[in-house]
Amino acid sequence: MRRPTTAAATALTAAITAALLTGPGAAVPAHADTAHLPVILIHGRNADPGVWGTLMTGLRSKDVPAFAWSYDTSRSTNEVLADELTRYVDNVLSRTGAAEVNIVAHSLGSLPSRWYIKFDGGNQKVANWISLAGPNHGTSLGYLCALWDQGCKDMTPNSWVISHLNQDTETPGPTRYTTFWSPEDEQISPTTSTKLNGATNIETDGLKHNDFLTNPGVLDKVTAILAG
């Protein structure tokens, strides 16, 4: 039997490699394509999914499936909300047929989504996590309502939730992390609380806490990140 020529051998090798990469059960590089993954938007305290109107419209105009999770912001991050978010993400994955989602969270919404990623297996299902003005290291304003509101208590600096989220690693992979923060944020104290070790931390001067939800510059950057 004749050996194939060098050119033929090269072509044969390429064909076999292509077949292996595209065949059933082939391994796919993590987060190879995030441009059209479903996006889950998570509102902050005392808000509802309606705050995402601008970003929702922008994402859907680009044919990106966008969903807004509604939850009771007075409930416990780790005992209640993370479990509810787990079920919501699984439902979105089932509905869309996707293997992963992207998450954009505003303010308090950063905490249950971080808990889901770090402790409930979400790091295998969330490609990008973006925090807009999140109290990732707590905010002293949480003390104002901590006595009667568990969500506020979870947001206080060094709370049980905050301390566990930031223990060992603040950004467990392979999820990619981005935060947006502003020195003029009147709800997050200190304002640098949003930044996380291991994340891309973007400073956005001049923005108040709720400005992140509609600011064109921020939303353009968020959309670009989600597009990979």
Image: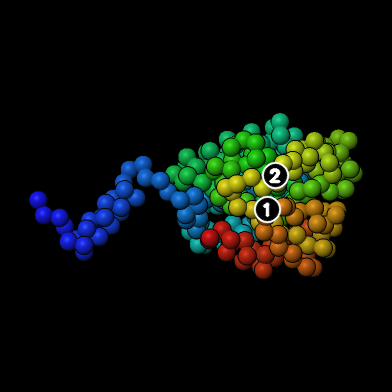
Residue drawn at point x = 62 percent, y = 51 percent? 129
Residue type of the residue flagged with mark 1: Gly
Q: Residue 26 in the image: state x and y as whole percent.
A: 37, 45
Instruction: Check disc 1 and report its element: helix, strand or loop.
Output: loop
Residue drawn at point x = 52 percent, y = 38 percent? 91
Instruction: Check disc 2 and report its element: helix, strand or loop.
Output: loop
Q: Residue 192 in the image: state x and y as whole percent.
A: 80, 57
Q: Is residue 71 above or below residue 11?
A: above
Along the line of sight, the residue nearer the viewer: 54 or 163: 163
Residue 158 relative to residue 44: left or right: right
- The answer for how far apart the CA atoms under marks 1 and 2 are is 8 Å
Q: Is residue 147 above or below residue 192?
A: above
- Identify the residue position indicated by label 2 in the image: 169
The reply to whether dot 1 and dot 2 touch (C-beta < 8 Å) is yes
Q: Residue 227 in the image: state x and y as whole percent.
A: 53, 61
Mark seen at residue 198: 1
Mark seen at residue 45: none
Residue 38 relative to residue 28: left or right: right
Q: Residue 89 in the image: state x and y as whole percent.
A: 56, 41
> In the orientation shown, which residue stands out farthest toward the top?
79
Q: Is residue 175 above or below residue 192?
A: above
Residue type of the residue flagged with mark 2: Thr
